[in-house]
Amino acid sequence: MLRPIPFSKVFAVGLGNALEFYDFLTYSFFAIQIGHTFFPAQKTSHGLLFSLATFGVGFVSRPLGGVIIGAYADRVGRRPAMTFSFSLMGIAITGLALTPSYDQIGALAPILLVLFRLAQGFALGGEVGPSTAYLVEAAPPERRGLYVSLQYMTQDAAVLAAGIVGFALSSWLTPAALDAWGWRVAFLLGALVVPVGLVIRRSLPETLHASDRESPASDTAKIPRRLVVLSLMMLASMTIVLYSIDYLATYAQDSLHMTPSQGFGAIVVVGVCTMTFDPITGLLADRFGRKPVMLTATVLLMVAAIPSFALMAHTGSVIVVYAGTAVLSVLSSLAAGPTLIAITESFPKHARARTLGTLYAVAVATFGGTTQIAVKWLTDVSKSPLAPACYMTSALAVGVVAMLLMRETAPTPGDGSSEMD
């Protein structure tokens, strides 16, 4: 049996994960500026919709990345799969940052933009399964919650980093400069740290050994369909919530008419709150179990969503927006962490990376890629700033149903195995 890997070393997995999510999510925070660069002939509202649609394109290739890179991780190992996905992301983010504008090369500009977004999606789709599987396998059974919390903690660190970079650039630069080249700086900063991430990942010990690798296809087929359906429901619910909250930078500017720097300030709040509470959530899940923590937080989030958005829209106050953002961010962190832990623990080791990676990518591609454009469209059609909250609440209701039907996966005292290990 593999000896647990010290948390300090496993943290290196999180650092690489953070860099990948920074590169992918930065696009959504600069959606308005990217829309001006690649869709300049359109009115601002249409340009934003096209820009958000291109953001969604990055989710189309995520399931394919989850299947191909996840299968590679189950066959060859977690470390080489994580190294490959990270390298591909570095190539894609550099290409996107250096793509000329529509004014310079015409229709080729948005075509290149779409191609690089597809490459980003493929890379990130293949990142989540192997990296989360690695965290579960590296952890002592009684600390799996804490270890797996690194997945969301580092994603949220990426949100925070992107928010700080966006806040700084939007504060220092004029709107014209931000449109012309400022957003490119944010992407290039992510590209600069890719070599560091590659060195870190190549130094990690492997958690998948010859005896763990792919079992016959008949064994893989034994994964219960009920588990697959419940996992998809839970992942879809959490995906809609997290991407709705990430939309707040655009929401603050587009619906509440705040300045770009104030909008990016909301993302900084999101990053600080979620990154702080992610490890706390992991510890709570280890102490009290996965279901009690995620159910309590999800129900509280359902109760808080509409009142929070109503207060933000009614007052238009920056302080109120930041306070509402903080409440939603903390509750989403408490709900999402145990959800991912429970799902990951439920799958057998020989199929864990590709099964989790594929389900995660399908859920995110279907709902994460459409959430921001759906919220924007619903807001325009309904003329209501509460559209994001209503969309979130509906998704949370689906998540609660699945959580109630899901089995508890936390190891019992003296039991070192999970449900399907």
Image (tube, grey):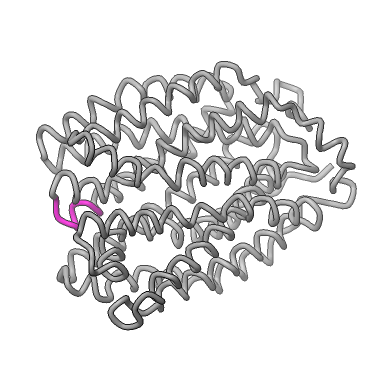
Q: Which residues are magenta?
A: 258-264
Q: Quadrant of the N terminus?
A: top right
Going by the image, does 386 lie left or right of 70? left
Going by the image, does 182 lie left or right of 150? left
- Total label count? 0
Against 276, residue 395 (above or below) is above
The front one of 219 and 115 is: 115
Q: Position of residue 7 (x, y in %)?
A: 62, 48
Residue 259 falls within the magenta-colored stretch: yes
Against 172, residue 57 (above or below) is above
Quarter of the rendering containing residue 412: top right
Q: Position of residue 323 (x, y in %)?
A: 22, 36
Q: Position of residue 411 (x, y in %)?
A: 70, 25
The front one of 235 and 203 is: 235
Looking at the image, which residue is at 73% across and 44% down?
A: 4
Going by the image, does 69 lie left or right of 146? right
